[in-house]
Image (cartoon, rainbow, N blue to C red):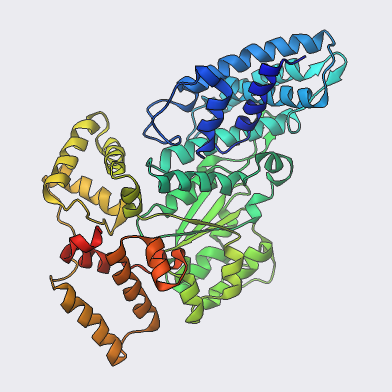
Amino acid sequence: MISKSERHFLSTLSKLTYCNPFATERLELERQALGDRYQAEDYLAWSKDIRLEDSDRPNVVLLTSRAEELVEKLHKKLQRGEAADESAIALYQDLVAYVLYYRHTAKMKVDSTLLSDRKSQRKISKIWQDFLCESNHYLKLPDRNFSVEGEPAHQFACFFQVRRAFRYIFDNILGDSRPAIELRAMVWQSVFTHDMRRYRRLLYDRMRTMTTLITGPSGTGKELVARAISLSQYIPFDSEREQFSGLLAKAFVPVNLSALSPTLVESELFGHCRGAFTGALADRQGWLEVCPEYGAVFLDEIGELDPAIQVKLLRVVQNGAYSRIGESDERKFTGKLLAATNRDLAEEISAGRFREDLYYRLCSDRIETPALIDHLQDNPNALQGLIAFISRRLVGEEAEELTSEVEAWVAGHMDADYSWPGNIRELEQCVCNVLIRQQYQPRNLAPAVTEEDRGKLWLAEAERGTLTFADLLSRYCTWVYAKLGSYQQTAEALGIDRRTVRSKVDRELLEQIRSDTPKACNS
C-alpha cells in the first residue's frame, strides 16, 4: 500500500505533526521529509521575525502539498480494500490529522474576542462542519473506521488549542536568540508537555491542576509568558451546540500581589461574605471564584505574599479548596494557577519568609525568563528585532522609520556592551523616549569609582559585618561574573551551580562595574 519513499515521508511527517514547533528539531524534520526539495532557511527556529505566517512558509507549503497528494492516493487504496498493516494505518491516521489541521484551523484568526460574539460562533460552526465532513470522509470507510486521537469533537478542540498556543507564543515571546528560542519551546511544553500524543490521550483536561512558576529578572516578560499559557489551555468543543465551552476574553486573570496590602489580597483572592469585617457591606467573589474553569489566575510577585495567606493558598494548590472570608463552606477552584517572582525563593525560604511546602507545590512546572543581556550576548542583532516590534506597536506603518531612528541613537550614544538592566521594559522606555524627545537617558546608577575603590567598598562592608550572607554572595558572584563574562565559567570558579550564579548576579552592580572596566567585562 505504501512505497518505501512514501513511508519515509510519512514517518517524518508523523513526527512533525506531534513535535514542538518552536524547537530546533522542527526545521530538521522538515529537511528530512523534503530531501532535495527542502529550501534552506537562515534561522534556527520559528520566531516573530519571520514575516510569513507559519502555514505560508515555503517548506510548509511543500509539505502540505505532498501530504494532500498522498492522503487522496492512500484513501483511494483503502476504499478499494487494499491490505494495510498496523504501521501503515497509523501513518495514514497521522497524515489525515496533518491535512485536517492545515485545511481547517492553521489560518484561523485568534484573539481574545474570538468566541465572544455570534459572528465568530458562526465561523467556528462552519469550520467544524467542514472539518467533520472531511474527517468522516477520510476515516470512515465501508469496511473499517479509524480515529485520530479520539472523537472528532475532541480532535477539533485539540486543533483549536494548537492554533491558539502557536499564535500566542509566536506573537508574544520575541527574538531569535537561543534564549528566546528555548523560552518559546519551554512555554509550548508547559501547555502540551514533551509528549503531545500522551497529552491528547490523557492530559488535556488535567494540566490545569499543575501550577507553573515563572522566575526571572524584572522586565523580562513573565506576564507575557503567563498570558500565553493561560490563553492556550484546552477548551472542550460541544458538537451538539457546535460551540466551545469557554470564552477567551475571561480566561486570564492577572493579579499583582505587591500592589495590595495583605488584608486586601486575602479578600480579593478568596472573596468575602457580608459582615465578615468592617466595610464588608455585601458578598464579594474573589479572583479564584471569578476565574472560569478553563482560565487561569496569574499571581505576580508571589514572593511578597504574606505568610498567613501562603497557608490558605497552599490548600488551593494542593486540592483546589478555599473558602470566602467569613464563611465555612468550602469552594473549589477549577482553573489553573500561575505565579511569578523576581526574588530568589530559596533565599526567602531560608530567611523564613516563604513556606517551603508552598514552594514545592508551585514549581511542578517552572520557567525562567532570560534577561535582555542574555539575548544580546548570544545574538547582538536581536536588539534590532525587538526595537522593530516595539516600534510597530507604537506607530504602526511608520515602524521602519522609528526603528532606524532608535537604532541610530543607541549606536551613537550608548556603549556597545550596555547591559540594559531594566530588560525589555527599559528598551520600551528607550524607544518611547527617542520617539518623544529624540534622546534617552539611562538611569544614573552610581557615581563613578575605580575598580580598586569599588572592591574596597564592599569588602570593607563585609569586614565590618554589615552585609548579610545573601548580599555578600550576590556581590561576590557579580564581581567574578564581571571579570569572567560567563555564567558557566563563574560557576566553575566558585564551585556552585550555573543557575545559582545567574540568580545572584546584581544587574545594577554589574552595570556599574562594566562602566568602569569595559575590557575586563569583555574578556
Q: Where is residue 115, by image quadrant?
A: top right
- Indicate the position of residue 435 as horizontal and vertical percent values: 17, 42
- Indicate the position of residue 247 as horizontal and vertical percent values: 57, 40
- Indicate the position of residue 124 as horizontal and vertical percent values: 59, 26
The quadrant of the rendering that contains the N terminus is: top right
Q: Residue at x 61, y 66 (%)?
A: 361
Residue that sits furthest to the bottom in the current view: 464
Residue that sits furthest to the right in the current view: 143
Count the marks: how many?
A: 0
In the image, is residue 130 above or below residue 189? above
Q: Residue at x 11, y 46 (%)?
A: 412
Indicate left or right for 36 with 127 as reference.
Answer: left
- Indicate the position of residue 51 as horizontal and vertical percent values: 37, 27
Indicate left or right for 39 with 66 as reference.
Answer: left
Determine if residue 339 is in view. yes
Query: 104 or 479, which lies in front?
Result: 479
Indicate left or right for 359 with 156 as reference.
Answer: left
Query: 191 or 46, which lies in front?
Result: 46
The quadrant of the rendering that contains the C terminus is: bottom left
In the image, is residue 134 above or below residue 430? above
Determine if residue 240 is in view. no
Q: Residue at x 37, y 77 (%)?
A: 473
In the image, is residue 75 above or below residue 363? above
Q: Where is residue 397, by image quadrant?
A: top left
Indicate left or right for 463 with 354 as reference.
Answer: left
